[in-house]
Each structure stands twice: as C-alpha cells, then as structure tokens.
Amino acid sequence: MVRKIENARERFGTAAIELFRARGYADTTVAQIAAAAGLTERTFFRYFIDKPEVLFWRAAELEAEVLDTIARGDDPKPLNLVIAALESAGRFFDRHRQGVQVRQAIVAEHPDFQERELMKMRSLAIAIRTALEGRGTPTGTARMVAQVGVLIWQAALERWCEDELRRDFAHHVHTSLAELTDATAR
Amino acid sequence: MVRKIENARERFGTAAIELFRARGYADTTVAQIAAAAGLTERTFFRYFIDKPEVLFWRAAELEAEVLDTIARGDDPKPLNLVIAALESAGRFFDRHRQGVQVRQAIVAEHPDFQERELMKMRSLAIAIRTALEGRGTPTGTARMVAQVGVLIWQAALERWCEDELRRDFAHHVHTSLAELTDATAR
C-alpha cells in the first residue's frame, strides 16, 4: 500500500514540475497535472491538499532522511553528523537537478511559498535539534548546531542552483561550511 | 510630524503590551488598546493595519538601527560590524525586558505570527547583506555573515528571554557567537 501511495505522489510530482517548467506555475491547472500523470483530479486531492503542496511534499521525505542519517551516524561531533546528513539528503537534488531548479525558482517568486519554505526550515531545525538531543548532545549545543545545519542547507542550495559548473550538492555544503567557519573565526 | 506619529505608535504599543500581559492577547480588543492609550480606534488603524501589527512594527526600527550601525562602523571584519550592530539594537530589549518577553511569548504561541517573524528575519538578513555589500564586502561573504548575524540574533533573543539572571542582550550575543564558533571549529 505504501509503495502504491508513493508512486501516485511521484507521478503527480514529476508531471507537475514538467508542466510548470513548460507552461509556468500559474498557467498549470490540477486537471492538467492529473491528465499528464495519467490519474484523476480527484486522486490528486487524495494526496495533496492544494496545488502548491506538490512543491512542498518532498520536504518531509528529505527531513526523514536527514534524521535517519543523524540517528545512524557514529561521529562524536554533532556538526559532522549533521553535515553528513545534509550530504546524504542532497543526493536527491543531484539526481533531479532540473526539477529542483524549477521548483526553487517558483518558490522564490511567491512570497506565500517563501513563508511556507521558512516554516519547513524551522521544522527541520527543530527535528535536527531533537535528533541530536536524542543522542545525548546538550540542549544548547544541539540548538545551535541544528540552526547552523539549516543555514548551511539553505546556503548550499542557493549556490548549487546558481552553479554553472553543475558541481554536486556535497561540494556546496563544504564550500558553505568553510565560508561559515571563516566568517566566525576570531 | 514624524515625532507625533512616533508618539502615537509608542502609546498604542505600550498600552497594547500592558493589556496583553494583563488579559491575554486574544481577549484584548483594539477598542481597549485605544482607550488605554487615550486615543481612538480610528487613529489606531491609521498606524497599524491590524491588531497583530502592534507586535511587529518595532522590527523596522530595529532593522534601521542595525543598518545604521553597520554603515557607521569602522571594523574591517564584517562579522564584527554585525555583532556590534546587534548589541546596539539589543539595548532596546534590555530597556523593555518585560514587554519584549510578553511579545515573544505571544509570537511563540501563534503559528501565523511565527511565519511573520520568520519573514522579518529574512528581510533583516537581506538588509544586512546589502549594507555589507555597500561597504565593499564580497557577495558570498556578505550573504553568509548576514545569515550568521540573524542566527546569532535569534539565538541570543531566545537565551535572553529564558535567562533567570537577567543578563543583558549583549552578553547573550557573545555567548551565542562563542557557541557558534565552537560548533563550527574543525
């Protein structure tokens, strides 16, 4: 059953992004997304509360992957666990470069979607903090490392989207971390 | 004229926070705020688009102070300019500790207000980045230092609100920065 659900979501999601790229977000209807996915509009609304949700549903999956990598890691340094988790989740971006870029451009153009994105990032920070605390990291450190993780995630994604050399997400995670370390060095 | 406007805003703002503290946010009406401020409801809506705005209007002033301090600073290190600016703006918090704590608690309880707060923080990051670029800081560094500044601001504010010893905002800026430096040290 789970596989079936994931397949429908994927089909809608892939069809939607392809239509957004070709016709623009505003000019794409849910009926067109459903038709392109070979499914019905009614089925669409069983998986997504509204059209914007096709831009956001993946965040929960990426968050789950980040948390899983943190839980399984064995590095004693909390930031290293988080960096490894960002790299792992970021492989999704490398595999779906064009789709992610289309998605990011749409979010950047809509203030409402930026708010939704910021709330997802806040949720990610809280989840990372909780995962680190679950491993025994003190609260103050867990909170700061989680926020640093989200900051690196956002900076890396911005750089990755702009990178004409198409280097992978992990490269930009490390560049962003180095930049952060330089900025905060005394 | 400007002074008169600022006075009315201040009177509404002070009256509102005092009522929120005493009666709760939800149980306070704009009519009650206006009465407590010795002004009319109609005047209230000349200065604030809605009741929540009394929780957010101050952000623009704090942002202006941050930008002004960055513009006037002479430290060659961008992060030091930003830290000095946060300390300067944070003196407002020390002078209005109880009001700020009431305000923070209300925002924390309302997801809508958290979104609005996150958008203000995003706006602050963009403004700091622009101010640094205006001083010749390269774009990549300016972007990262601005994001670090906002992160420190948020962490310091959270710690300051929770601090039973009532140490000043600048103390928490430095504690948060030290924690960040530790977290990112290799």
Image (cartoon, coloured by chain):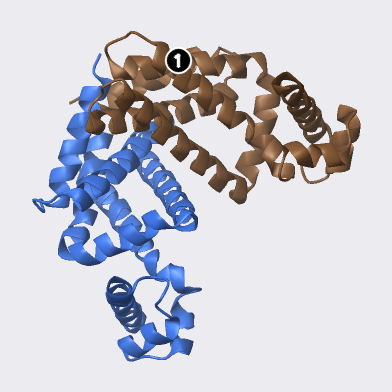
Chain colours: A brown, B blue
User: Residue B94 appears at what percent x and percent y?
Assistant: 16, 59
According to the image, label 1 marks what residue? A69
* Disc 1 element: helix
Considering every residue shown, the one lying at the far front of the view is: A1
User: Residue B151 appears at what percent x and percent y?
Assistant: 33, 39
Q: Residue at x 24, y 67 (%)?
A: B99
User: Residue A115 appears at what percent x and percent y?
Assistant: 54, 47
Q: Answer yes or no: is residue A24 visible.
A: no
Q: Residue at x 16, y 37 (%)?
A: B175
Residue A50 lies left or right of residue A137; in this view the side is right
Q: Where on the picture, by quarter, is residue B55?
A: bottom left
Q: Where on the picture, by quarter, is residue A109?
A: top right
User: Residue A74 appears at what percent x and percent y?
Assistant: 34, 8
Disc 1 marks a residue whose amino acid type is: Thr
Q: Answer yes or no: is residue A177 visible.
A: yes
Q: Where on the picture, by quarter, is residue B20?
A: bottom left
How dense is the environment of label 1, judged by Cα within 10 Å: few (below 14), some, or many (20 and up)?
many
Q: Quadrant of the C terminus of chain A?
A: top left
Q: Chain of mark 1?
A: A
Camera-nearest residue between B139 and B172: B172
Residue A90 lies left or right of residue B74; in this view the side is right
Answer above or below: position of A59 versus B94: above
Camera-nearest residue between B73 and B8: B8
